[in-house]
Image: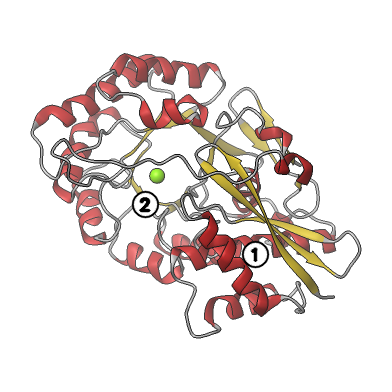
Amino acid sequence: MKITAIETHVCNARMRNWIFVKVVTDQPGLHGWGEATLEWHTRSVVGAIEDISQLVVGEDPRRIEHLWQMMYRQHFWHGNGIVRGTAISGIDIALWDILGKIHGVPCHHLWGGPVRDHVRTYCHLGGGRMEDFYDTDPADAKRFGDLAAKAVADGFTAFKSMAVPETMPLEGLRPITYAEACVKAMRDAVGDDIDIMVDCHARPTPRMGMRFAKALEPYGLYFFEEPCWPETMEDIAAIQRAVSTPIATGERLVGLHAFRDCVEKRACSVLQPDITHCGGLTEARRIAALADAWKLSLAPHNPQGPVSTAASLEFGFATPAYIICEAVHLDVPWRQDVVNEGFTVEPKGRIVRPNAKPGLGIEIDEAEVRKHPFQQEVLQRSFYRDGAVGDW
Ligand SMILES: [Mg+2]
């Protein structure tokens, strides 16, 4: 059995170009789907997949670990950068899909079988609609409360918001007051039974991140995400130590060694590997073992397309430390047109029952994908009030 081709199918979904990776074999009808979506780096990732494909075309797709080692280590440059890491991840996910299809079982059965009956999901405020999630004015606390109530009305028991505004390196009370008002409005709107998450997008400096964390501590957040730059893990660790709120991070990390650094510094309670960036399902499983060793929770980053979601769910059904699946459902109205999914989402509670189909249980409709060709992603640049470059 041999890999005969690796194709990329780019599908523009407004804020992102989903990069679907199709690994084709010499067995009639046998192929796997992966995803390697990396916003604002679409051409780079497509090129990186083309480069890497020279290593694996002609090889046996069942030797996933062996191929992973080749993709990560060969041709001198290791796969620990975000572009190459994403390219490797997309191919790796597709290889697991193929292996499941060969054996006629869902991927989670390859990894020891289901460890839970359902996976809980959480949404972005506004369902992932770009304007609601990223552009709601932090001065408009009522809007946060309204969107929170809508998420609960849609069946979710947990949601994530960006209630921390873009913040200059040091500011007084203004951004803190905004964040506090937004989180209070959401808590007031949904009560104590609903889990609220706040993502800082690593916008704040370490000290501002600390101040936000302290101000929001009384609201009992489920987790508080990327409170400052991931380049300075010691600073995230200081925030993790200073508050009882669980700190979450990891979506920008590539490779097991980066996560080792994070857990050794005790920087978080929740690891958020992105399965489409960190090294695929193969590396995510190693990161899960690391999480087990340190008694950390896993909540993979997943704002991308439907293959990424299917991969995250398969991983969740086989991974004890997995707590919740990030899910975007309203980013584009035709999201369900490009994919056939093997799992079912229960409207009440938005929990997912296991996929019973082989592999990831999905099929991508290539004709539908072709209706949404590549477009330059919407730019999301950020500048402070004085014109200096900020963090989006
Ligand atoms: Mg995030």
CA separation in Å, label 2 and label 1: 24 Å
Left or right: residue 11 versus residue 356 is left
**Proximity of marks 2 and 1: CB atoms separated by less than 8 Å:** no
- Give the residue number, with chain letter if any, for mark 2: 249
Q: 94 above or below 121?
A: below
Picture quadrant where residue 336 is located: top right
Helix, strand or loop at label 1? It is helix
Check disc 1 and give the amino acid type: Ile
Quadrant of the rendering where the C terminus is positioned: top left
Q: 2 above or below 373?
A: below
Check disc 2 and give the amino acid type: Thr
Colour setting: secondary structure
- Give the residue number, with chain letter if any, for mark 1: 91
For the point 54% across and 61% down, the residue is: 45
Q: Quadrant of ligand 1?
A: top left
For the point 71% across and 38% down, the residue is: 371
Q: Residues within 10 Å of mark 2 (few under 14, many from 20)?
A: many
Q: What numbered label is drawn on residue 303? A: none
The location of residue 7, given as percent across then percent down, is 71, 61
Helix, strand or loop at label 2? It is strand
Picture quadrant where residue 140 is located: top left
Left or right: residue 391 versus residue 303 is left
Q: Nearer the viewer, residue 362 or 224?
A: 362
The location of residue 164, given as percent across then percent down, is 27, 34
